[in-house]
Image (tube, rainbow, N blue to C red):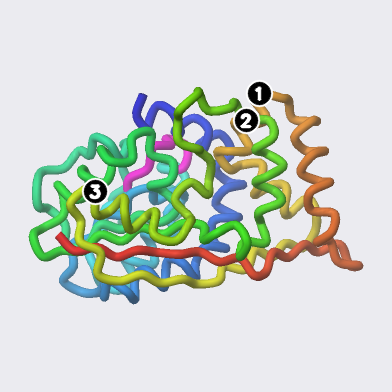
Amino acid sequence: MGSEEAQGKLWGAEADGWAAHEVNHSPLFEAMMTATGIGSGNNVLDIGCGAGHSTALIKATGASVVGVDAAQGLVDYAKKTFAGIDFRVGGMEDLPFGDDEFDVVFAANAVQYAADLDTALRELKRVCKPGGLIVAGLFGPPEGVAYKPVLQALGRFMPKPPPGAKPGGPFRLSAPGVLEASFASAGIEVSETGETNCVFAYADWNDFWTGTRAAGPTQMAIGLAGLEVIEEATRKAVEPLVAEDGSITFDPNVFVFVVGSV
């Protein structure tokens, strides 16, 4: 089962909620764009484009861009919200493009959800032009991620990996050197690494829960344990971070990225 089948329904179930949360990742999008020098004259693939915020930022530089996501609901949202941009549904293990089409392949918060990481990275390499760049960004090591308690709360309800399988979850590529090694295994030469802080800030519980509930891992946990159980577990996880005025802030919240050349 590829990422489209495994992740599409989860992430597309509450597209409006995810879109409200997705903007919190803008510092990561911008850092990845700067690292790859995206601008006018570039042809860019934004894989795992979600609700389209990263794709719109890329488009604003003057680059030509196509946004692809596994979730039909998110693609529909992106098309409705960001007119004039080419958005398509697809999984990263089988991209609907020919060889050597893109100057930059951009994957923010995407590759950690690949059903087959090596296949996905080789697909990103296949569609990238010789001399082009591939950039992937995701959560940094857990000790630098204030959002970790939420993910840990959800993780208690997830199926355990089969014996001998590598650990899964949102941090599976976050340890130093892991994503770099995955790039190298797929034949992508690492040229740069970096990190940035994405502060997640919410006015109150409802603001926080609307965005968090819409994320794929939360939707999976709800499907396994029920909405009330997951909401209560998540509420307990964030209690220490609730300010007197009811606002909730996750800071520091470190994301890392790796740039590779083809």
Type of amino acid at the residue the image marks with label 2: Met
Given residues 218 and 89, the one toward you in this image is: 218
Q: Position of residue 136 (x, y in %)?
A: 35, 58
User: What separation in Å lies between label 3 and label 2 (alpha carbons)?
Assistant: 28 Å
Given residues 204 and 93, the one toward you in this image is: 93
Total numbered circles = 3
Q: Earlier in the sequence, mark 2 or mark 1?
A: 2
- Mark identifier at residue 185: 3
Disc 2 is placed on an element classified as: loop
Cβ atoms under marks 3 and 1 closer than 8 Å: no
Q: Which residue is mark 2?
A: 158
Disc 1 is placed on an element classified as: helix
Q: Position of residue 30 (x, y in %)?
A: 42, 72
- Mark identifier at residue 224: 1
Q: Earlier in the sequence, mark 3 or mark 1?
A: 3
Cβ atoms under marks 2 and 1 closer than 8 Å: yes
User: What separation in Å lies between label 3 and label 1 (alpha carbons)?
Assistant: 34 Å
Q: Earlier in the sequence, mark 3 or mark 2?
A: 2
User: What separation in Å lies between label 2 and label 1 (alpha carbons)?
Assistant: 8 Å
Residue 48 seen from this side: yes
What residue range appears in magenta?
68-74
Name the residue rendered at 46%, 67% in the picture: 28
